[in-house]
Image (spheres, rainbow, N blue to C red):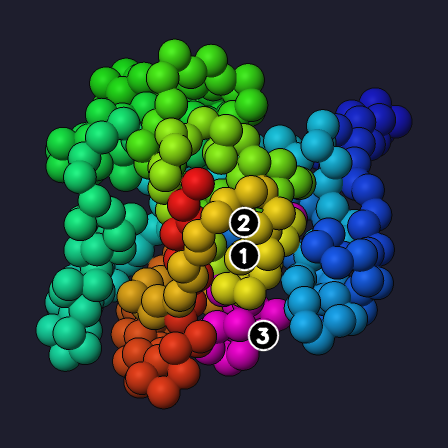
Amino acid sequence: MEDLWGLNKSTMQQDRIGTETKPVCYLCGKHGKIFYRNLVDYLFGTPGKWAFKKCSDSDCGLIWLDPRPTLGEIGKAYQNYYTHGQANNAQQTRPARIVRAILHTMSIILLGLRVERRRYKCMYLDQIPAGRLLEVGCGNGKRLARMQALGWGVMGQEIDPVASEYVRKVRGIDVHVGPLETMDIPEKYDVMIMSHVIEHVHDPVALLMTCNHFLKENGLLVLLTPNAASYGHRKFGATWRGLEPPRHLHLFTCETLIQVSQKAGFNQHRCWTTPVSADGIGQRSLLSAETNKDRRQLITTRDVLRGFWFQLAASLVFLTDKNSGEECVLMATK
């Protein structure tokens, strides 16, 4: 029994994530107020309870995780991450798959989302001449393959060796494994893209400064990130899919994103929000321990229906509130 207890204790110690406290706002230095507490990771099963703070300065409004995993420990939060399976870890029942296919098509037609979805999938580069493109945090390479098919010369960067090996072997696309700042670049890039990356990093300004350095003169950075001011966040609160503790370290609005890009040295900025992916937010918010079996979410027909109705509601809200979209889109020019 003592050996068994010793083994269990050792396993718990290995699973525990080392943290650091961040009591003040990353952008303005003001103290934060507790926004959410005792959150758990129902998505990928990372142990621990987590809290978010919000900047006390209403003109800032940045939201951040405190305490947060240290740089040396954050990898433990990705052990069961979706890129390790090369597909989203959510499993749908067969009826849910059928219903989702029907409702997804209906929502695109009813809400006129076809053009927006096409632009979203190519990171809003549909009117930009193809050139050299680097994706920061390329994950399983799906977006890189799409951009390559559109004529771009692509390269990926990824800190996850499992995901990057998949991109090389299956997609046939070269990937730098390691932090962005460790890349050697023989020629600077026309465009750099990142989708749902900036919220994961400890130092967002440093990341964008490196992007700035890697871009040609007048080069373009395009990024997507969850919108902390979204309709979904207001509706779902502590169960909003965009929180994702403990991997999401900072949550942005268009205003705070522009601040970050300015601090990183970008000259021109455009930032807007989009509700185009609201169905996924509706499906995967309100998760609980019962929805996560063996660390794989079970998406039911009920979840799919909730996603459909939420897509309708979010799109209607967006008609009168252009800051309510589930994601922020930032375009910044060097």
Instruction: Give the x, y percent position of residue 3.
Output: 83, 23
Q: Earlier in the sequence, mark 3 or mark 2?
A: 3
Q: Residue at x 24, y 47 (%)?
A: 125
Label ID, residue 257: 1
The segment highlighted magenta reads 227-246
Q: Image quarter for residue 35?
A: bottom right
Label ID, residue 17: none
Position above or below: 314 against 187: below
Q: Amino acid at mark 2?
A: Ser
Is label 1 or label 3 in front? Answer: 1
Label ID, residue 237: 3
Q: Which image quarter holds the N terminus?
A: top right
- Marks 1 and 2, how far apart in space? 6 Å
- Categorize mark 3 by other alpha carbons within 10 Å: few (<14), some (14-19), many (20+): some
Q: Earlier in the sequence, mark 1 or mark 3?
A: 3
Q: Residue at x 48, y 34 (%)?
A: 211
Q: Image quarter for residue 210?
A: top right
